[in-house]
Image (tube, helix red, strand yellow):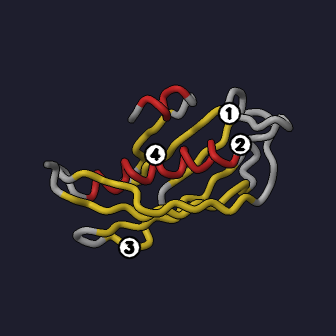
Amino acid sequence: MGALAESMGIEMTLEDGVVVGRMPVAGNTQPYGILHGGATAVLVESIGSVAAALTSPGKLSLGIEVGVTHHRAVREGYVTARTEPIHVGGTIVSYSVPVHDDEGRRIATGRLTCLLRDPQ
């Protein structure tokens, strides 16, 4: 999963071919006590990169673009994200990654594009 995702408390599961990530808000906040936008981006890229790698075993999945639109603030609990494929090609894979709070409200929408390439 990677040291950054682990240090942020991100947990991943595979549910019916969809990578799902869960992250605590505590420890991942900005100075105002709300979930840091960068933490949400790490969650999006972490689970999206794993999903991309699962589409092409043996290839490296390299994030080449990530973006997050934040819809609402979260101060406590956990956030959960799910990968939704937009495009799955031989070398480029893109995902929409909606992120929800414990109440099921969408707090952000992420987008990730990964390059799939052979290891060197």
Where 67 sits versus 19, above or below? Answer: below
Tell me the quarter of the picture where residue 35 sits: top right
| Percent of width and height locating residue 108 | 68, 57
Ranked by sequence position, the earlier of labels 1 and 2 is 1
Which mark is in front, 2 or 3? Answer: 2
Q: Which residue is mark 3?
A: 87
**Amino acid type at image mark 1:** Asn
Determine which of the numbered discs, if any, sits on residue 62 in the image.
none
Gap between marks 3 and 1, in whole Å? 30 Å
Q: Mark 4: few, some, or many residues within 10 Å (few <14, many ≥20)? A: many
Question: Is mark 1 in CB contact (under 8 Å) with mark 2?
Answer: yes
Q: Which mark is residue 46?
A: 4
> Three-letter amino acid code at disc 3?
His
Q: Residue at x 52, y 65 (%)?
A: 96
Q: Which mark is residue 36?
A: 2
Instruction: Tell me the residue that label 1 is attached to.
Output: 28
Marks 4 and 3, how far apart in space? 18 Å
